Amino acid sequence: MQDREKKPLVIALDGPAASGKGTLAQLIAKQYGFAHLDTGALYRGVAAVILEAGGDPNNAEKAAVFARDFSIDQIENLNIRTKEVGAAASIVAANSEVRAALLDFQRRFAAAPPGGAKGAVLDGRDIGTVVCPDATVKFFVTASPEARAGRRWRELKVANPDLEETAVYKDLLERDARDAARADAPMVAADDAELLDTTHLSIDAAFAAARRVIDGVFRRCG
Ligand code: DC
């Protein structure tokens, strides 16, 4: 019983690209003083290292070697927020050996959050289903593809003013399909996840809704 009480609290946020889960995860971590791990950044990091080395993200064997050698510290020296890295990340994320190589780090982060934080917030695609199936609170954050493509386009066009919104929309649908259809840890809501549709919600409203759920669970856990 005492051990259970000492276990860090874990908040899992899963959902498709540009659903708002990353921003929500940051706000939640700040609100509760928890450590935050953007697990998509790990897949993006592996993809960026492969692309930088002139490698092919579709080469499963080599991608697995890159993933096993990968360390989160490499991310700060990589540009992981490009459209190309996003597409390559979705390819390497369908590779079971890449997923296995990154799993342990994510679980250790949740079990022993850095900085002595009493909890961890992880956002991704399989946190509530595979990485932390015992998470204290789980969300599946979603929004319509049109709303998500608009958000992602507005972010990306800052660096790439010629980018067409339709191209972003097409990429997003391809990525959703690949993330949801893969055999290993597909993007799917955990049975016990709280659904949060942000299509018509401001980030403040989505955050308030998430907080109500979290506070309710924390009250029940004591
Ligand atoms: O959330 P994102 O766009 O940064 O994620 C990049 C890719 O990584 C995306 O195609 C899905 C994949 N991913 C995953 O498969 N599992 C996770 N836990 C996080 C991301």
Image: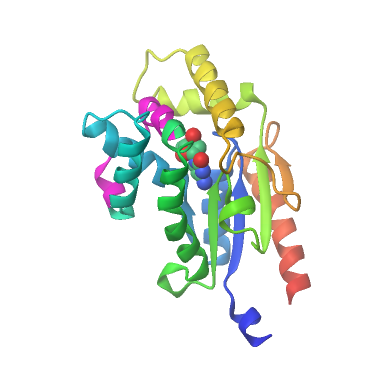
Left or right of 176? Residue 87 is left
Spot occupied by residue 194 in the image (x, y as percentages of width and height): 74, 49
Spot occupied by residue 77 in the image (x, y as percentages of width and height): 24, 45
In the image, 192 versus 162, the foreground residue is 192
Residue at (61% x, 33% y) in the render: 180
Label tally: 0
Left or right of 88? Residue 35 is right
Left or right of 164? Residue 215 is right
Spot occupied by residue 59 in the image (x, y as percentages of width and height): 34, 31
Residue 89 found in image quarter? top left
In magenta, the rendered stretch is 74-89
Residue 85 versus residue 163 in the image, above or below: below
**82 drawn magenta:** yes
In the image, 142 versus 88, the foreground residue is 88
Residue at (40% x, 51% y) in the render: 101
Residue at (51% x, 64% y) in the render: 110
Q: Residue furthest left?
A: 53
Main SS, magenta region, reads helix
* Residue 26 appears in the rendering: yes
Q: Residue furthest front?
A: 61
Residue at (45% x, 29% y) in the render: 155
